[in-house]
Image (spheres, rainbow, N blue to C red):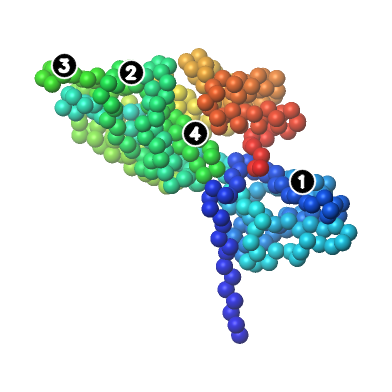
């Protein structure tokens, strides 16, 4: 007996694979004029590089494109069987058949949290910014992280690091002329092109001459921490250790253990807004929405201007249908940053959930126009507006 080993067909280079950010794809096919009219168009797909093939079904109108609904994320290969009065274009694909088209489907944007940026004033001459973050996605590029900064409150963004590995940490020595209030932004990009950004609170950069006895600032602007003698350095270190362990478990998806570590950190130092926010996110993932809301609310009390804490609060409020409270939180975000395209997009989603299509349309139009640089938000807002026009709201984009 001869044993035949079937192997997957290697896909082309990644830049030759189409990317889609929606479950619903529109797949084009072309037919020579001489072959028309078609009597049958059949679509087949594979999830394992051609080892196995599945019949998706017929294109009833026999006109390109055909709509395909992806059941889950990942790499898909497609083959068409076309038929006219003369006959078929070929046999159904067999194990080992090379797909005619490839598409990578990823409809879930990354989850990004930029933690408080700390300033370390080393030897009173050259400050160092300690940047820490959490970024989670199932389909990240190998080096998905980009960092930029601007002078507060409305300077132009300037990139200072790109194509970083998702290590969760980066130390930056700002260039010599830079000082004053500085805002840091982190952007994470996944394989399908989702770009999600998070902005930290402003920090103060002060350069002092050698021998200057003035104590430089070492924390965030507006930080209302407890007095330095209220907690020992050892306790602060213990709290930070628990917090970092929580981040590790959270990134692994070990949410029960992550929540316990964040709670340990807060038991030592209750005034850790970054621990409260991450605890809120972890509880959200565990579907403990009431506890998640409480954690985010405490974070917003400690840091009223921290937008990401309010975004987390909005997500938890929306999932349990507290749309009025979610709208109030979004209004607070927009009062501080009226150009926040993501907030306008979410406000449109809240309006739609409340059954107010007119308000949803206005908010999505605002999201699509308020910030020309928010490309990902503009694309999603435009897709929502188009779906609203068609009468079916689907948050996604064509896979073509």
Please identify, in this view, whether the residue under mark 2 or under mark 1 is nearer the observer.
1
Q: Earlier in the sequence, mark 2 or mark 1?
A: 1
Q: CA distance from mark 3 to mark 1?
A: 71 Å
Q: Earlier in the sequence, mark 1 or mark 4?
A: 1
Q: Which residue is mark 2?
A: 181
Q: Residue at x 66, y 32 (%)?
A: 383
Q: Residues within 10 Å of mark 2 (few under 14, many from 20)?
A: some
**Which residue occupies the foreground of this view, 210 or 234?**
210
226 horizontally vs 160: left or right: left
Q: Earlier in the sequence, mark 2 or mark 4?
A: 2
Q: Residue at x 60, y 82 (%)?
A: 2
Number of residue marks: 4
180 horizontally vs 163: left or right: left
Q: Which residue is mark 3?
A: 214
Q: Which residue is mark 1?
A: 64
Q: Which residue is mark 4?
A: 196
The reply to whether dot 2 and dot 1 touch (C-beta < 8 Å) is no
Q: Quadrant of the C terminus?
A: top right
**Which residue occupies the foreground of this view, 96 or 183?**
96
Give the secondary structure at mark 3: loop
Residue 138: percent from left, percent from top: 50, 46
Q: Residue at x 54, y 39 (%)?
A: 193
Give the secondary structure at mark 4: strand
**Which residue occupies the foreground of this view, 14 or 145?**
14
Quadrant for residue 94, please give it: bottom right
Q: Residues within 10 Å of mark 3 (few under 14, many from 20)?
A: few
Q: Earlier in the sequence, mark 2 or mark 3?
A: 2
Please identify, in this view, whether the residue under mark 3 or under mark 1 is nearer the observer.
1
């Amino acid at each position: 007996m001869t044993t035949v080993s079937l192997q997957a067909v290697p896909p082309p280079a990644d830049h030759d694979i189409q990317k889609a950010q929606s479950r619903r794809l529109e797949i084009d096919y072309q037919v020579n004029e001489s072959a028309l009219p078609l009597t049958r168009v059949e679509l087949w797909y594979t999830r394992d590089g051609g080892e196995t093939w599945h019949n998706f079904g017929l294109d009833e109108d026999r006109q390109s494109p055909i709509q395909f609904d992806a059941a889950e994320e990942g790499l898909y290969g497609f083959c068409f069987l076309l038929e006219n009065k003369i006959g078929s274009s070929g046999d159904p694909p067999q194990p080992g058949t090379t797909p005619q088209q490839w598409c990578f489907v990823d409809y879930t944007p990354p989850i990004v949290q930029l933690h408080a940026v700390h300033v370390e004033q080393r030897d009173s001459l050259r400050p160092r910014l300690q940047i820490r973050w959490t970024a989670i996605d199932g389909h990240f590029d190998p080096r998905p992280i980009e960092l930029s900064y601007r002078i507060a409150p409305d300077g132009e963004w300037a990139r200072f690091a790109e194509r970083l590995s998702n290590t969760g940490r980066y130390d930056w020595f700002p260039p010599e002329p830079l000082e004053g209030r500085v805002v840091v932004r982190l952007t994470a990009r996944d394989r399908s092109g989702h770009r999600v950004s998070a902005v930290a609170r402003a920090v103060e950069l002060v350069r002092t001459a050698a021998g200057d006895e003035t104590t430089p600032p070492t924390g965030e602007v507006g930080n209302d921490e407890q007095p330095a003698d209220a907690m020992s350095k050892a306790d602060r270190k213990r709290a930070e250790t628990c917090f970092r362990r929580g981040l590790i478990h959270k990134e692994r998806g070990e949410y029960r253990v992550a929540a316990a570590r964040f709670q340990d950190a807060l038991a030592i130092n209750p005034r850790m807004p970054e621990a409260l926010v991450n605890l809120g996110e972890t509880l959200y993932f565990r579907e403990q929405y009431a506890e998640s809301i409480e954690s985010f609310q405490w974070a917003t009390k400690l840091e009223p201007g921290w937008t990401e804490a309010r975004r987390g609060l909005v997500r938890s409020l929306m999932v349990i249908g507290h749309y009025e409270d979610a709208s109030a939180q979004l209004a607070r975000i927009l009062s501080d940053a009226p150009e926040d395209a993501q907030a306008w997009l979410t406000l449109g989603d809240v309006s739609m959930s409340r059954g107010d299509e007119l308000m949803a349309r206005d908010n999505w139009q605002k999201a699509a126009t308020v910030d020309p640089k928010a490309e990902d938000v503009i694309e999603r807002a435009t897709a929502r507006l188009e779906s609203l026009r068609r009468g079916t709201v689907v948050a996604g984009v064509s896979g073509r």
